């Protein structure tokens, strides 16, 4: 069993369903005067945040994740949930005078999302878990406290810990120089296709230049699968097929957990990417980001059904 350090956000996800399509209610010629209201059919609250979601999926897979993040005075039920699922919280800082970060997410019938995010305790960094970091085979810097996202890569580099940089929702707050510094010594860079394009624009690089600065670049493509680039070699990976699509929230985080599990297990890159896509379908089949479960027997059966080959032996 291996250990992974996951930094990012801990948040309560307040998820709402809009039965229509956003595009039917937004007039392009009036975008400068945007004032819309959406009546939602369903409202639920779930445990979430990038670090929480990635760590949860890694724990269900059998890894030992340690979260580095800050949470607020209302964190107790979330704490109990993560501890029940064997997630190490030695890197979580509790900020007594703040509430845990919260995401307010409206999803339309085409799975487009509009999100409002309250940072709350995430305005503070987590605690660096030195003992857990020394045991870790891999570290993941996912969207969270901005200062921490720039401080951790240097710390991981000094300790000789391979790390991945995942700017995600914090990308708009980063400069090109900050991005270039964060990925300079990273094992890999992971983002969706829109985020990749924005990051390249900010850095002033081409995708080929990015792939020369870091060992691996992974581009997630939602229901179209993903791409893995190593130098000049690009591998396109097909998606796994969900039985149904109830809620896409957290699918990217689940993909990351599956991919990083495969990577840490020494699996070939295409296998790790396919496995990431497979873990992600369990999230979209359930409402919420940590409401799904799976067994290794189920994963092996669905992997063979989707990709007509067997999973390697788990680590």
Image (spheres, helix red, strand yellow):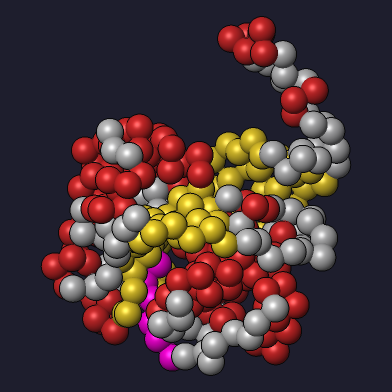
Image quadrant for the N terminus?
A: bottom left
What residue span does the magenta drawing correspond to?
1-6
* Residue 143 on the magenta segment: no
How far across and how far down the image is residue 38, in percent? 78, 29
Quadrant of the rendered structure where residue 286 is?
bottom right
Along the viewing direction, whichever of 170 and 42 lies nearer the viewer? 170
Q: Which residue sits at x=51%, y=70%?
A: 270
The main secondary structure of the magenta stretch is strand
**Is 29 on the left-hand or right-hand side of 167?**
right
| Number of marks | 0
**Is 110 on the left-hand or right-hand side of 139?**
right
Along the viewing direction, whichever of 28 and 101 lies nearer the viewer? 28
Along the viewing direction, whichever of 138 and 300 lies nearer the viewer? 300
Q: Which residue sits at x=48%, y=61%?
A: 235
How far across and how far down the image is residue 169, in percent? 47, 43
How far across and how far down the image is residue 73, in percent? 48, 58
Q: Is residue 135 visible?
A: yes
How far across and how far down the image is residue 279, in percent? 63, 70
Q: Compared with residue 244, is residue 192 higher up or lower down, i.e. above or below?
A: above
Q: Is residue 75 visible?
A: no
Quadrant of the rendered structure where residue 312 is?
bottom right
């Amino acid at each position: 069993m291996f250990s992974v350090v996951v930094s990012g956000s801990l948040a309560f996800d307040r998820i709402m369903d809009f039965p229509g399509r956003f595009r039917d209610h937004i007039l392009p010629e009036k975008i400068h005067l945007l004032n819309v209201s959406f009546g939602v059919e369903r409202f639920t609250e779930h445990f979430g945040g990038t670090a929480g979601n990635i760590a949860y999926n890694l724990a269900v897979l059998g890894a030992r994740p340690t979260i580095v993040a800050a949470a607020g005075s209302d964190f107790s039920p979330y704490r109990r949930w993560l501890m029940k699922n064997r997630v190490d919280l030695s890197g979580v800082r509790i900020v007594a005078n703040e509430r845990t970060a919260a995401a307010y997410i409206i999803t339309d019938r085409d799975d487009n999302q509009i999100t409002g995010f309250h940072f709350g305790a995430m305005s503070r960094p987590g605690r660096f878990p030195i003992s857990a970091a020394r045991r870790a085979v891999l570290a993941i810097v996912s969207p969270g406290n901005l200062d921490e996202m720039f401080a951790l890569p240097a710390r991981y580099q000094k300790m000789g810990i391979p790390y991945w940089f995942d700017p995600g929702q914090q990308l708009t707050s980063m400069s090109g120089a900050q991005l270039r510094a964060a990925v300079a010594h990273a094992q890999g860079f992971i983002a969706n296709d829109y985020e990749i394009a924005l990051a390249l624009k900010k850095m002033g690089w081409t995708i080929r230049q990015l792939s020369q600065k870091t060992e691996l670049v992974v581009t997630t493509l939602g229901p179209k699968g993903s791409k893995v680039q190593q130098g000049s070699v690009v591998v396109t990976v097909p998606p796994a097929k969900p039985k149904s699509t109830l809620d896409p929230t957290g699918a990217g985080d689940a993909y990351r957990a599956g991919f990083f599990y495969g990577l840490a297990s020494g699996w070939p890159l295409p296998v790790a990417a396919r496995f990431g896509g497979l873990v992600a379908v369990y999230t979209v089949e359930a409402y919420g980001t940590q409401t799904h479960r799976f067994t290794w027997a189920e994963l092996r059966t669905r992997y063979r059904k989707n990709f007509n080959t067997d999973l390697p032996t788990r680590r």
